[in-house]
Image: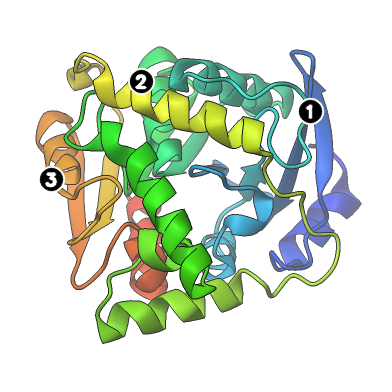
Amino acid sequence: MNNPQAAREDARASYQDTPTRTVSAGGVDFAYRMLGPDAGVPVVFLTHLAATLDNWDPRVVDGIAAARRVITFDNRGVGASTGATPNTIEAMAHDAVTFIKALGFPEVDLLGFSMGGMIAQLIAADEPRLVRKLIIAGTGPAGGEGIKNVTRISHLDALRGLLTAQDPKQFLFFTRTANGRRAGKQFLARLKERKTNRDKTISLRAYGAQLKAIHRWGLARPADLSAIRQPVLVANGDADRMVPTTNSADLARRLPDSELVIYPDAGHGGIFQYHGEFVAKALEFLARER
């Protein structure tokens, strides 16, 4: 990361204009985007089920990137990244570490949403020197309440979306209240702001592998979260259907150094519905001295 011209371009870019790059490591060509100032500890975003580079809310990415270097990437076998998609969270965590080390960063902060929050927990526990702080949202611990039901809920809402000509994320991420419906439509519109050089959508095979990984996580034995010594910000909506909000409270209770934020009248995508408040809280948390 020693190209001054590229660093200047990254600092000026917004997420909708940020070019997609690739880095090769561990037999995989990882597709990624990077923006924000070339200073301080970078924040690596870890994606949710079925997500590619284009599924991150640009208000969250640009908001964090106003103060910190932000890196998003496609998991192995997803979007523009090569390889076969793993069917365990453990393998996804290993891939994420491989990607981070390939970029040459000795230390990072992690922002993991949903499946990405599961991945983040493993990285923090297994690579304590690599991770400075964690932000995990809409997620839960291994063996967490209701996580084994993600496959059923995802299939159900995919069908609901098909029958109503709506994006399934309208049902999966947001409440069915007036506020939730409006927030969902606004979020989905923001995801379409990038008009050129968009990422490839996830394949059905890769999607199936990710569902299997999450199901296994939901059936796993509870982990000893006391091994995660880094400061952790846990966030969610108060009515998460995909990964029930009780899991966020459970994480905050079991992590030694944690803080919990719950957004009202919000579902799985609470950090996107309350993107302004979330970005402000995330930046304050990241800037806080340990």
Report x, y in % for residue 71. Answer: 64, 46
Report x, y in % for residue 46. Answer: 52, 40
- Mark 2 or mark 1, which is nearer the start of the sequence? 1
Instruction: Name the one closer to the observer, 240 or 263.
Output: 240
Instruction: Name the one closer to the observer, 211 or 111.
Output: 211
Q: Label 3: which residue?
A: 246
Instruction: Name the one closer to the observer, 219 or 286.
Output: 219
Q: Label 2: which residue?
A: 216
**How busy is the neighbourhood of tag 3: few (under 14 within 10 Å), some, or many (20 plus)?**
some
Q: Label 1: which residue?
A: 82
User: For the C terminus, which image quadrant?
Assistant: top left
Q: Which mark is residue 11?
A: none
Q: Residue at x 70, y 29 (%)?
A: 77
- Mark 2 or mark 3, which is nearer the start of the sequence? 2
* Residue 165 placement, left or right of 13: left
Of the residues tagged 3 and 2, which is closer to the observer? 2
